[in-house]
Amino acid sequence: MEDKNVLLTGLGKQLVLNSLTDASVQKATEDTPDFAILPWVNVVKIGGQSIMDRGRSAVYPLVKEIVDNLPRHKMILGTGAGTRARHIYSLAIDLGLPTGVLTVLGTAVAWQNAQMLHYLLAQYGIPFVEPEGFSTLPHYLLERGAVVCQGMPPYKLWEPNPVAGRIPPQRTDTGCFLIAEVFGARKMIYVKDEDGLYAADPKKHPSSEYIPRISVEELLTRDLEDLIVERAVLEFLARARNIREIQFVNGLKPGQLTAALEGEPVGTIIYRNGDAE
Amino acid sequence: MSFDHSKSQHVTSSLMRESLVDKNVIARTEAPVSSILPDVNVIQIGGHSIMDRGRSALLPLLEEIVANQAKHRMIIGVGAGIRSRHIFSVGLDLGLPTGALAALSAKDSAQNAYMVSCLLAKHGFVYLEAPFVVQLLPAMLAAARGAVFNGIPPYSLWEHPPLVGKLPPHGSDAGSYMVGEVFGARSVIFIKDVDGLYAADPKTDPEAEFIQQARAQEIIDRKLRTLPIEPVVLDLLTRAKLARSIRLINGLTPGNLTRALNGESIGTLIQQ
């Protein structure tokens, strides 16, 4: 078999001849180069419960800020789910339905929020793109500067079970992070309703410690009861190859998204150790 | 994090205003799960181990599936195989990320699944893409006599970054297992070209110890260098709610699948 494989690289021969579960084969893929597919794009996640559920008072100023930034920054705008997802998760858990079904249901809520954001941005030529249409993103981003998508990863019934309970562990924070990672994006910015990360939920504990900058390794070690972001995002950031930091800004404060897009250290930055100090 | 109730529009629910990241809230969602299709068996046909061997391996296996059709409802996941290894090689050389490799590889298993569905078509099996598995599988099983699906899950660009290297961690073993788990299938059977799980690769080490039965966590803890199934399946098994065991059998030995479907102890049984 080896003689016929003259076109394959050394790694290629290992892949063809050995088991893909072989630890040495996996290790050998570690040293391959990384190509960034859309190095100039910014992935911006708009919170469901934190922004969209607030309606006009929160969404309109944010839409204006997004439009103002279109000439300077290209954006993939992903949406979260929010209170309707919480309702249907409660109902579906009560009905005895599995996690994969909860993902199908929750995806519909993120989709609704993405549609609403898309309606508000449609007059600027900004399309809504389903996961199946992602190969058209480069065109829309170069022509119009932004696209809207729903933040849930398209796992549907194939969502893995969580370690505890029944709520899908990989939701819209994770879906947006994975978009940023696979495209080698310039920035991953989460727009929520807090100034960033606190040691405890600031809405329940107003005096809790504010954390403007922390490594993902330290944050995982601290094992906080509550977090500003899904835990899966932290696990994936720790082993990501393209994304080196993620930023959290307060979408209720005008100018914070713009500052983050300009590279200013507003809100909280969670970074991968040994990279950005 | 949780939610400032003063300025917002809520729907009342037990999770209203709660942070879904809060560990205490997550723990509260532990409750019994019901099985959606409790009499279905998920059969996974290996890509490299069975499909790449062609007629000599596949046709006897499909005959055995048809022979069992009257007694057992089956949905068949199919893996990718050698073409995916080739495109991984080219894609890695080009510097493509894990999510791109996952999107590319899923087409190889789709081809294999489509071929299997053509070979079983006259016996009433249909081929279902992921969106149709979500919407139509129960109806198709009621009307048709079986279904074939792409074993690789529809993660595509959203595939998880692996712990080591760049290969997509969720292949067709993971996808087929997750179909069994979400529908609460009667059994999940992986058809390979080895008798089951060994402590080392039996193709290179004929003396390797055969493991007839083990718990998923025990196998993870042994840190074996190579496994006949994707390691992520073991992680998924530790979190199972419904599909709490899987069986690995040798599809090159006639009768093994029938015995596995009848609940006999054949191959390797991996339990939660």
Image: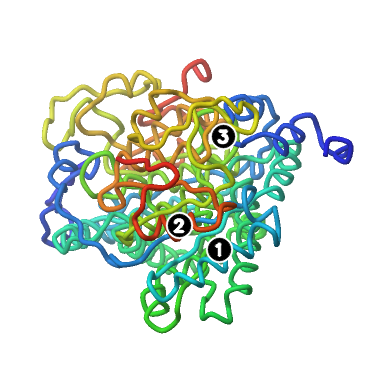
Amino acid found under the numbered disc labelled 3 = Thr
Position in image of residue B165 (x %, y %)? 59, 29
- Specify the quadrant of the image occupied by residue A84: bottom left
Where disc 1 sits, the SS reads helix
Q: In 3D space, how far apart are the residues under numbered discs 2 and 1 (Cα atoms)?
A: 9 Å
Q: Which of B225 and A35 lies nearest the eye of the viewer?
A: B225
- Dots 2, 1 in contact, CB < 8 A: yes
Placement of B87 over or under A194, stated as above or below: below
Mark 3 or 2, nearer chain start: 3
Give me the chain letter of mark 3.
Answer: A
Placement of B134 over or under B5, stated as above or below: below
Position in image of residue A89 (x %, y %)? 21, 58
Q: Is residue A131 left or right of residue A56?
A: right
Instruction: Please tell me whether mark 3 or mark 2 is closer to you in this view.
Output: 3
Residue displayed at 39% across by 20% down: A217
Placement of B130 over or under A249, stated as above or below: below
Q: Which of B185 and B8 lies nearest the eye of the viewer?
A: B185
Q: Is residue B53 left or right of residue A163?
A: right
Q: Are marks 2 and 1 on the same chain?
A: yes
Position in image of residue B40 (x %, y %)? 35, 66
| Residue to which mark 1 is pinned | A132
| Residue to which mark 2 is pinned | A154
- Give residue A21's mark: 3
Instruction: Please tell me whether mark 1 or mark 3 is closer to you in this view.
Output: 3
Amino acid found under the numbered disc labelled 1 = Glu
Q: In 3D space, how far apart are the residues under numbered discs 1 and 3 (Cα atoms)?
A: 29 Å
Where disc 2 sits, the SS reads loop
Q: Residues within 10 Å of mark 2 (few under 14, many from 20)?
A: many
Amino acid found under the numbered disc labelled 2 = Pro
- Give residue A13's mark: none
